[in-house]
Image: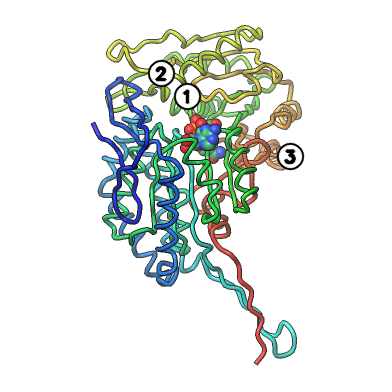
Amino acid sequence: MKTLRNYIGGEWVTPAAADYRDLTNPATGEMLGRVPLSGAREVNEAVAAAQAAFLKWREVPPVARARYLFKLKYLMDQHFDEIAATVTRENGKTLDEARGSVRRGIENVEHACGIPTLMMGKTLEDVAAGIDCEYVRQPLGVFAAVTPFNFPAMVPCWFWPYAIATGNTFILKPSEQVPFSPTLIVELAHEAGIPAGVLNVVHGAEDAVNALLAHPGIAGISFVGSSPVAKLVYLEAAKHGKRVQALGGAKNHVIVMPDADMDRAVANISESLFGCAGQRCLAGSVVVAAGKAYEPLRERLLATAKSLRLGYGLEPDVNMGPVVSARHKERVLSYVEAGRKDGAALLLDGRSTKVAKHPRGHFVGPTVFDGVQPDMTIGKEEIFGPVASVTHVGNLDEGIEMVQRSGFANATSIFTQSGKAAREFRYRVGVSMIGVNIGVAAPMAFFPFGGTKGSFFGDLKAHGQDSVEFYTDKKVVISRW
Ligand code: NAD
């Protein structure tokens, strides 16, 4: 059992007066350790350390800053299995899912290694006779990120590698529910020799976030979590004059056309609905079957859902782990009850599913509703659990209309063999991440990641070139000699 400490100015420090939260393995109930719940005092210390490190760090040539990240990438590869197992232990997802997410995290470190090229400015000679104009990108100071429980290793890597590669210094506030894997990666960053104060970790919850939002020494905040908190972070950070990118929740629709390759579609959609126990911002949630796709799709999805094996993700042959906590399980079950009350047909009920070997695990079996309407609670709110809603529309236009009605706009997919239908879909839907015959439309590190409407508050998204934009100022110099 481990008691975590903050990482400030290159040292692991015990917070002065913090409360602690006990953490358990969501599959087994085994005690994992304790995380401190820091407050304004610890945030102030971290900001002071990050500010002190900034002036020197920004002078380190980008190519030399990148070398620390090359080293970190090497260490993350070396410790790959340990990081993935830590993700499974604290979050509950299966080891395969954890491995996939750690790989995605490493890809961000790899991409940030290209910072000498990514960070270049531009020049134009003779903007007027004898006058030249250029812009250079400069870091802004101290940035912070606040991250969610569902991808403990990956999501923090969407932010801090880019922020420090561009010459800023950083404070990470990981989810207090899953702080072990991000801490392990920061231990590796320490081993890679990243100088003291460049990267800091403050563990905690709401109090720590509020202190970060209000601190005048922080230039900007990157946030990922639920929509209500994303909106609050966006408004508060803006009120305090900060840059902010706040990624929120989702309700992703998957349209299936009658001409779809049904075998492939069902395999992909099932993975999208039930992978990571539905706790993915890109998870399919509402399956919209058009015309004759409806019956075969519903029957096959149901059969696939029934075949999934629940269990502890570190054990072999497990397809689906638990949800993250008892509290989250209650929330998911309350949505199942709401669906039943609203009159949707409960085709498969996972509420009382048990895993004999792990009676203390927070398991929810795959659950399938049919006849879900957009105005039902389960048709419009994010459930974030292994609960699929199936609905039937007449054609593509009606499917698109349903997507457009949603208050969220993170991701959506279409399954079809018609290029025309796919083109129509991608052209018309106002959703930012689109899959065509892909169940989980996850942009890789070199593309922007984030939604619109209620799923995203801000303008510059996570990773890709947007990251470089977010973490730098473009300074324009106009010269005449
Ligand atoms: P959450 O909003 O409860 O917590 C996220 C972070 O905010 C945590 O670090 C937490 O400590 C902090 N926080 C929580 N409540 C707060 C408050 N009132 N004031 C200040 N800070 C607060 O989210 P979660 O349950 O950890 O994560 C799941 C959510 O994240 C889902 O809604 C999911 O869709 C979303 N998510 C979105 C993306 C995306 O790319 N859009 C990616 C992953 C997860």
Q: CA distance from mark 2 to mark 3?
A: 35 Å
Amino acid carrying mark 2 in the image: Leu
Q: CA distance from mark 2 to mark 1?
A: 9 Å
Q: Is residue 60 above or below residue 382?
A: below
Query: How far across and down, in percent of the image, does residue 337 sit?
Result: 57, 9
Quarter of the picture holding the N terminus: top left
Position of residue 336 in the picture relative to residue 99 (left or right): right
Q: Residue 61 appears in which quarter of the rendering?
A: bottom left
Residue at 70 percent across and 39 percent down: it is: 430
Q: Mark 2–mark 1 contact, CB under 8 Å?
A: yes
Amino acid carrying mark 3 in the image: Arg
Q: In the rendering, which numbered label is found on residue 308?
A: 2
The residue wearing badge 3 is: 428
Q: Residue 353 appears in which quarter of the rendering?
A: top left
Q: Mark 1–mark 3 contact, CB under 8 Å?
A: no
Position of residue 176 in the picture relative to residue 225 (left or right): left
Local SS, label 1: helix
Whether residue 280 is visible to the viewer of this picture, yes or no, is: no
Foreground: disc 2 or disc 1: 1
Position of residue 470 in the picture relative to residue 418 (left or right): left
Query: How far across and down, in percent of the image, does residue 404 sit?
Result: 73, 32
Q: Relative to the observer, which residue lies in front, 113 or 237?
A: 237
Residue at 34 percent across and 42 percent down: it is: 15
Does the beta carbon at disc 2 come under 8 Å from ligand 1?
no
